[in-house]
Image (cartoon, rainbow, N blue to C red):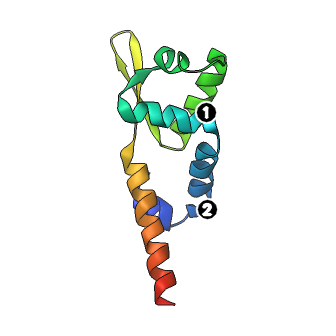
């Protein structure tokens, strides 16, 4: 996702997906874990007392929002944060604040 997606056509849909992803405490904790280092699904699951299908569901929502990317390394798939989505959100928020302060 890039800045144009936040400011242009489909803006509401993209923001809804991002905010839906951020609305769940499990997904926010996953993001906090990934902030420290890339992790496999199994490593992520070890921090939670929920089922593997639930972890997979949360990871898929984060991936759909563009907040997490996965990369195969040998036999493992590692998940990492896509910082550009957060940079775009900050930029979008700054634009809103800039427009509001000019009013």
Q: Quadrant of residue 74?
A: top left
Query: 16 and 30: which one is in front?
Result: 30
The residue shown at (61%, 33%) is: 26
- Name the one closer to the observer, 13 or 25: 25
**Percent position of residue 56, x then y:** 59, 23
Q: Position of residue 35 (x, y in %)?
A: 39, 36
Residue 77 shown left or right of residue 30 in the figure: left
Give the residue drawn at x 46%, y 36%.
32
Residue indicated by mark 1: 26
Where is residue 90, by image quadrant? bottom left
**Pointer 2 or 1: first along the chain:** 2
Residue 75 sits above or below residue 56 on the image:
above
> In the rendered image, which residue does mark 2 sit on?
12
Q: Residue furthest bottom?
A: 103
Q: Is residue 71 shown left or right of residue 26? A: left
Q: Position of residue 101 (x, y in %)?
A: 47, 84
Q: Secondary structure at mark 2?
A: helix
- Secondary structure category for the residue under label 1: helix
Residue 40 placement (x, y as % from top left)? 44, 19
Residue at the far top in the pictured view: 75
Which of the pair 45/5 is nearer the observer? 45
Residue found at x 50% / y 19%: 41
Foreground disc of the pair 2, 1:
1
């Amino acid at each position: 996702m890039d800045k144009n997606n936040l400011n242009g056509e489909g803006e509401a849909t993209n923001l809804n997906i991002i905010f839906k992803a951020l609305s769940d405490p499990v997904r926010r904790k996953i993001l906090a874990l990934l902030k420290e280092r890339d992790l496999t699904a199994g490593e992520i699951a070890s921090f939670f007392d929920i089922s593997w299908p639930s972890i997979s569901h949360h990871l898929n929502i984060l991936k759909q929002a563009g907040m997490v990317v996965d990369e195969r390394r040998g036999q493992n798939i590692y998940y990492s944060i896509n910082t550009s989505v957060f940079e775009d959100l900050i930029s979008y928020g700054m634009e809103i604040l800039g427009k509001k302060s000019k009013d």
